[in-house]
Amino acid sequence: MRKEQHHKGWNEIKTNDSWAIFKIMGEFVNGFEKMSKIGPCVSIFGSARTKPDHKYYKLAESVAKGIVEAGYGVITGGGPGIMEAGNKGAHLGGGTSVGLNIDLPFEQHDNPYIDPDKSLDFDYFFVRKVMFVKYSQGFVVMPGGFGTLDELFEAITLIQTHKIGKFPIILVGTEFWEGLLAWIKQTLLGSFGNISEKDLDLIHIVDTEDEVIAILDSFYKNSELSPNF
């Protein structure tokens, strides 16, 4: 009897896994249809825990406003903290403000600065991550946690392996990022040789809104590359 129940339980799991494919397909289709109509955007990443009175919240807001004034839209993860700051800056600048929302322990709700017709909800991290990469002309990465680092290293890996085209990766906040980049250069590149020097070509560390905009403008004006949708 126990053996029969055990097999029944596994069969139910396998069936649920199979049916999940349709839900995953639905998220991809909905995401592709909505995002393809939005136009060139830059993704802003950073901690959901950053408070509105923090200097990096204010800087993210200013950076986002500059990005939309330069002709791009802004995509964030849709939650509070740096994401809210990014959407707020885009909103105040009169530009496109996109939120790719997912239910997480520290992100209880989407923020109020997302354009109503550009708020997308996801259950699957990997589907959401595809949307960030496919529809972004650049990544602006503010101080954050594991999720921020995940997005950063996924983008670097995809560019390194030629799975996606190159785009600028801009790390904002020297005090936060310089230790990580030093370790990458000294240990990954220098001591172990696990990466190539050219893998770091697209990574920039800056501290101001003007530097972010200058890098984006330079990348697209001085190369044969053009926005990817």
Image (tube, rainbow, N blue to C red):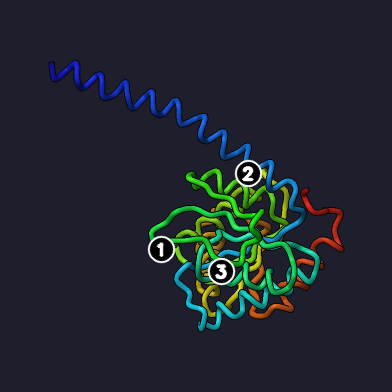
Q: Residue 95: which quarter of the image?
A: bottom right
- Residue 28 location (% of width, % of height): 60, 39
Front one among 127 and 206: 127
Give me the C-alpha separation between circle 3 and circle 1: 13 Å
Q: Provide the secondary structure element on which disc 2 rests.
A: helix
**Is residue 65 in view?**
yes
Which residue is denoted by mark 3 in the rendering? 84
The amino acid type of the residue labelled 2 equals Gly
Disc with the residue nearer the chain's start (2 vs 1) = 2
Q: Provide the secondary structure element on which disc 3 rests.
A: helix
Asked whether, in this view, residue 82 is left or right of residue 40, the answer is left
Disc with the residue nearer the chain's start (3 vs 1) = 3
- Residue 221 location (% of width, % of height): 86, 63
The amino acid type of the residue labelled 3 equals Glu
Disc with the residue nearer the chain's start (3 vs 2) = 2
Front one among 13 and 168: 13
Name the residue rendered at 82%, 61% in the picture.
220
- Residue 91 location (% of width, % of height): 68, 69
The amino acid type of the residue labelled 1 equals Phe
Q: Which mark is residue 77?
A: none
Image vertical order of residue 58 relative to residue 225, above or below? below
Q: Which mark is residue 106?
A: 1
Give me the C-alpha separation between circle 3 and circle 2: 20 Å
Image vertical order of residue 98 relative to residue 5, above or below? below
> Crowding at label 3, few (<14), some or many (≥20) Cα neighbours within 10 Å?
many
Q: Are marks 3 and 2 in contact (CB under 8 Å)?
A: no
Front one among 227 and 9: 9
> Crowding at label 2, few (<14), some or many (≥20) Cα neighbours within 10 Å?
some
